[in-house]
Image: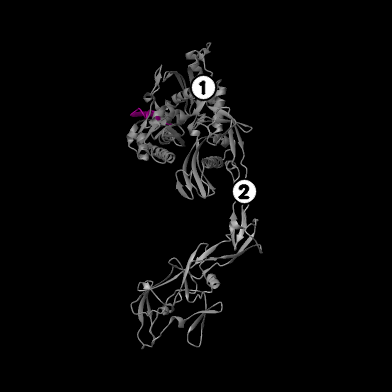
């Protein structure tokens, strides 16, 4: 017990940092000398009992006791009172969720950044809901970062939708959250230990700040902090830290495997695990009191499967966050020192083994010690907490007001308006202008939906200055949001829906195809304003058949064309069509007709009571021939036998011997004989090749 002495005020250039870990608490006192970070003193104390699990404080009183002891030791040795401390929230408390949000768009308008900002904000809120529902927790979460995985425009992948047009947009994001309870429990321990929080950061941020300095972040690197309960991951590329992750497997899995294999209690198994990194021979006593001495290689033979399982999970998480293996990986934390860990991780990532290394304190640039230096990778994070605090002093949280609500935001990054609105629970859809109600009418029996007008978008002000969702925010900013003004029903006249001047050209002559338009049974002019549920009917020429009747053309002797396309009688006319017709000797249409066989021996076809075609029209001349054997032809690739009668076999006879329905038109009937266009009266011969299909 150190006798209490009168303590002086802490020098202003010194900073106290605490790493409150699952296994131990590390306190460091450091100062800045130019660009160097100098560790003046440090104290390490293991938790006597398991008061923390996976970085989460479970017993506040026990953890407070350890923090107070570490602080007292440093105070007594250095002769000044420590009043404020920099701390870090465990990265293992981070939770990551994926979410997807889809919206319908007005395809006539360009996509703007305000829309993408809004849909990304909505996706973060969706991820937050998934997080709460899946983990069955009510705690609020800070969003400490997110990344867009993909955008899709009209179901197709697109890198950047801004400036494009489409009817549908979808975004997929991955977001990282920190629960409030983690921050609250840390604050509680610090306050009960007689300290104030000077700065709070995340352990992965602290670790990457010292292990991967800014000048290296242009490279695609991964940092893996293998602790006791979990392995924390941070990814850097293009000059910044892009994402954080966590795998709930780490050193404890190895400790527990040792305990099960050699019948050890947890503490003895933990001590044995630590010695494996430095000893070739290891002596230990199991719970039965039996002594053992084993080679490290012999022990590792029982642990390799567990190590491979841990590294495989870490590799999968890295690839999920980074979308590919990084260029290199730095491993820190005590768990990374287990023999074979880095080799196993390099294999799981498909990287050369020299690209996955352990980063130790003696490899840190611009870090010096005034006493015996800390060496192992487990001390990277405590040093990083202090360095981060020097760089971000007084910036653990910022406070802003959103309309009339005061909010505290975790300052782990450059914060934007969207971060504040997410924490305030703002509905992202309320920020984007919405259409008014749609108007639905019926046009010639088909429903037509007329979408409403767009309203005014929401307006965002920061300290009275018009801003946007991605505008930066600072401590004490006042954010005001004026909600979106919803659109109204669009005023539409009849002539906007129906073109009264619709016409076609027939052999160069313009023919109007709309005679009149009625609404709900009454004829209306183009100025009529449509109402919900209106039934609109047009009268006029709608098909080739109607066109022929209007122009008194005989459909038995006239063929209609649009360019090179031979048109059926049921072809639906469109405004602007250029139709040509010509007189032909042979009828080319397949229509629904009543077939009647008369006493003259011919079949007659009638449509709506009018005779349109007879076999006499098609068979111009028949010659009697002597009875002969059947002929063989190929129809659409299949052999067909046709028995010969006392007459020649003509093309039209083939329909009596094949399964091909010509009673209902399915387009234009195409007939070919030996590769050439066929007529119904063409005479068939043995070996002919016939093709019959609809076009």
Return the x and y of residue 576 as percentages of the image width and height: 51, 62
Return the x and y of residue 219 as percentages of the image width and height: 38, 33
For image coordinates 48% across by 50% down, the residue present is 155
Magenta stretch holds residue 436: no
- Could you say whether the residue bearing mark 1 is in a helix, strand or loop? strand
Tell me which segment is drawn in magenta.
Answer: 273-286
Identity of the residue furthest to the top in this view: 6
Q: What colour-coding does the image apply? A: one colour
Return the x and y of residue 254 as percentages of the image width and height: 42, 34
Q: Mark 2 vs mark 1: give the one in front.
A: 2
Task: Looking at the image, tell me whether mark 2 or mark 1 is earlier in sequence order.
Answer: 1
Assess disc 2: are there few (<14), some (14-19) or many (≥20) residues with their C-alpha within 10 Å of its C-alpha. Answer: some
Return the x and y of residue 424 as percentages of the image width and height: 59, 35
| Residue 530 falls left or right of residue 576 | right
Residue 426 visible: no
Q: Is residue 153 above or below residue 656?
A: above
Assess disc 1: are there few (<14), some (14-19) or many (≥20) residues with their C-alpha within 10 Å of its C-alpha. Answer: many
Q: CA distance from mark 2 to mark 1?
A: 55 Å
Q: Which is more toward the observer, 43 or 483?
A: 483
Image quarter of residue 279: top left
- Could you say whether the residue bearing mark 2 is in a helix, strand or loop? loop
Q: Is residue 18 above or below residue 147?
A: above
Magenta stretch holds residue 278: yes
For image coordinates 39% across by 28% down, the residue present is 215
Q: Which is more toward the observer, 471 or 559?
A: 559
Residue 453 visible: yes
In this figure, which residue is indicated by the disc labeled 1? 85
Label 2 with label 1: CB-CB less than 8 Å = no
In this figure, which residue is indicated by the disc labeled 2? 436
């Amino acid at each position: 017990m150190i006798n209490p002495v009168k303590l002086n005020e802490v020098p202003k250039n010194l900073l106290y940092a605490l790493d409150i870990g699952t296994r131990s608490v590390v306190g460091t006192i450091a100062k800045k000398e130019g660009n160097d970070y100098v560790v003046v003193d440090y104290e390490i104390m293991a938790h006597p009992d398991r008061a923390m699990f996976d970085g989460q404080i479970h017993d506040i009183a026990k953890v407070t006791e350890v923090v107070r002891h570490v602080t007292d030791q440093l105070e007594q040795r250095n002769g000044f009172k420590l009043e404020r401390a920099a701390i870090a929230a465990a990265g293992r408390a981070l939770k990551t969720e994926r979410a997807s949000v889809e919206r319908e768009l007005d395809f006539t308008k360009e996509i703007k950044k305000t829309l993408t900002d809004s849909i990304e904000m909505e996706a973060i809120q969706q991820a937050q809901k998934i997080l709460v529902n899946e983990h069955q927790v009510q705690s609020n979460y800070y969003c400490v970062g997110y990344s867009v995985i993909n955008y899709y425009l009209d179901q197709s992948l697109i890198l950047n939708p801004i400036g494009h047009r489409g009817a549908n947009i979808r975004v997929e994001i991955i977001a990282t959250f920190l629960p409030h309870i983690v921050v609250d429990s840390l604050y509680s321990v610090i306050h009960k230990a007689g300290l104030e929080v000077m700065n709070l950061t995340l352990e992965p941020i602290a670790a990457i700040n010292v292990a991967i300095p800014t000048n290296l972040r242009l490279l695609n690197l991964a940092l893996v902090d293998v602790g006791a309960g979990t392995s924390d991951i941070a990814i850097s590329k293009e000059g910044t830290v892009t994402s954080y992750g966590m795998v709930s497997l780490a050193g404890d899995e190895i400790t527990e495997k040792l305990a099960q294999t050699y019948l050890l209690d947890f503490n003895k198994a933990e001590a044995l695990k630590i010695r494996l990194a430095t000893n070739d021979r290891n002596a230990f006593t199991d719970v039965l009191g039996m002594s053992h001495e084993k080679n490290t290689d012999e022990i590792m033979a029982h642990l390799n499967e567990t190590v491979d399982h841990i590294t495989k999970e870490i590799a999968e998480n890295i690839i999920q966050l980074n979308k590919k293996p990084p260029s290199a990986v730095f491993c820190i934390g005590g768990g990374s020192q287990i023999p074979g860990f880095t080799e196993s991780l390099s294999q799981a990532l498909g990287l050369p083994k020299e690209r996955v290394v352990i980063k130790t304190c003696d490899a840190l640039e611009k870090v010096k010690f005034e006493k015996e230096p800390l060496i192992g990778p487990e001390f990277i994070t405590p040093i990083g907490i202090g360095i981060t605090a020097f760089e971000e002093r007084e910036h653990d949280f910022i406070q802003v007001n959103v309309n009339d609500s005061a909010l505290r935001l975790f300052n782990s990054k450059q914060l934007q308006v969207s971060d504040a609105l997410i924490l305030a629970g703002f509905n992202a859809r309320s920020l984007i202008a919405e259409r008014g109600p749609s108007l639905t009418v019926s046009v010639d029996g088909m429903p037509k939906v007329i979408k409403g007008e767009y309203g005014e978008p929401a307006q965002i002000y920061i300290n009275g200055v018009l801003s946007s969702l991605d505008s930066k925010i600072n401590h004490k900013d006042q954010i005001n949001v004026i909600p979106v003004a919803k659109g109204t029903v669009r005023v539409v006249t009849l002539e906007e829906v129906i073109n009264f001047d619709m016409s076609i050209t027939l052999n160069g002559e313009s023919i109007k195809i709309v005679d009149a338009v009625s609404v709900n049974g009454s004829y209306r002019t183009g100025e009529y304003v449509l109402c919900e549920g209106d039934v609109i009917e047009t009268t006029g020429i709608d098909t080739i058949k109607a066109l022929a009747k209007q122009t008194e053309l005989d459909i038995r002797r006239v063929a209609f064309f649009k360019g090179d396309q031979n048109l059926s009688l049921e072809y639906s006319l469109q405004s602007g069509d250029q139709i040509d017709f010509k007189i032909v000797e042979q009828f080319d249409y397949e229509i629904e007709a009543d077939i009647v066989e008369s006493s003259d021996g011919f079949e007659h076809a009638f449509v709506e009571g009018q005779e349109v075609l007879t076999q006499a029209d098609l068979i111009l001349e028949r010659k009697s021939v002597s009875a002969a054997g059947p002929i063989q032809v190929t129809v659409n690739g299949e052999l067909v036998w046709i028995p010969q009668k006392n007459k020649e076999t003509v093309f039209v006879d083939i329909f009596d011997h094949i399964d091909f329905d010509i009673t209902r038109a399915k387009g234009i009937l195409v007939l070919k004989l030996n590769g050439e266009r066929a007529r119904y009266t063409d005479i068939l011969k043995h070996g002919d090749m016939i093709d019959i299909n609809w076009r």
